[in-house]
Image: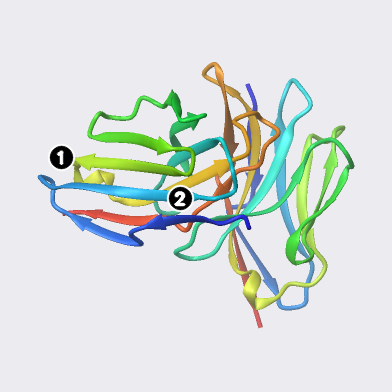
Amino acid sequence: AQSVTQLGSHVSVSEGALVLLRCNYSSSVPPYLFWYVQYPNQGLQLLLKYTSAATLVKGINDFEAEFKKSETSFHLTKPSAHMSDAAEYFCAVSGYSGGYNKLIFGAGTRLAVHP
Amino acid sequence: DTEVTQTPKHLVMGMTNKKSLKCEQHMGHRAMYWYKQKAKKPPELMFVYSYEKLSINESVPSRFSPECPNSSLLNLHLHALQPEDSALYLCASSQESGEQYEQYFGPGTRLTVT
């Protein structure tokens, strides 16, 4: 069965610093992977998705993620953090669980950005 | 346009009330979803509709009753809820229900059961 592990429930960076949010997946088949962001009191917004077309995926707001099969990782990065990036980030794999397809979310990582 | 709308934004209801949550999308998507999200947790899948038919019910209590009147609308009828049902209820849609299709989420309805 597919699963996702997000390393670090809280990450804190300074404004302008590199953002690195870690996600490792478990899947017996080539996975479809997604990163979502959730701002306070809002729904989830899709940042980017991996569908095997390219290992480096570019998303919105200068975020990108690199799929590394050998490391079963799909870490999210952004070169320079903005205050507005403070939010909860969820990594998810689309897979079969209980006999049907569903999005399987990681526990989430809360990103704090300090001036 | 990748917008999913949800109404109401906030809802407070007593344990004996009956209320409904509404979700709408105009992207031509054929799969729609209801999720429940508790604070500091990821969303939990409740129901999936594919081509207006209920395809997945994640063992949700019968006090939650979904309805898909047409391909653009999804309702969640609530009756005799418990305080532990207080949560953010999220609606989502995707082009189809297959694993390669990304889901687009609405802003959610914040439900408080008193």
Out of B85 and A18, give the one closest to the viewer. B85
Tell me: residue B75, above or below residue B111: above
Residue B85 lies, in percent from the top left, at 27, 44
Residue A80 lies, in percent from the top left, at 79, 72
Query: Residue B80 shows which numbered tag?
Result: 1
Q: Name the secondary structure under disc 2.
A: strand
Amino acid type indicated by mark 1:
Ala
Task: Identify the residue at horizontal 87%, vertical 32% (top origin).
Answer: A70
- Name the chain under label 1: B
Residue B78 lies, in percent from the top left, at 24, 42
Q: Residue furthest top?
A: A99
Q: Residue furthest front?
A: B70
Q: Are marks 1 and 2 on the same chain?
A: yes
Res. A100 visible in picture: yes
Q: Residue furthest left?
A: B16
Amino acid type indicated by mark 2:
Glu
Q: Which residue matches tag 2?
A: B24
Marked residue nearer the N-terminal end (1 or 2): 2
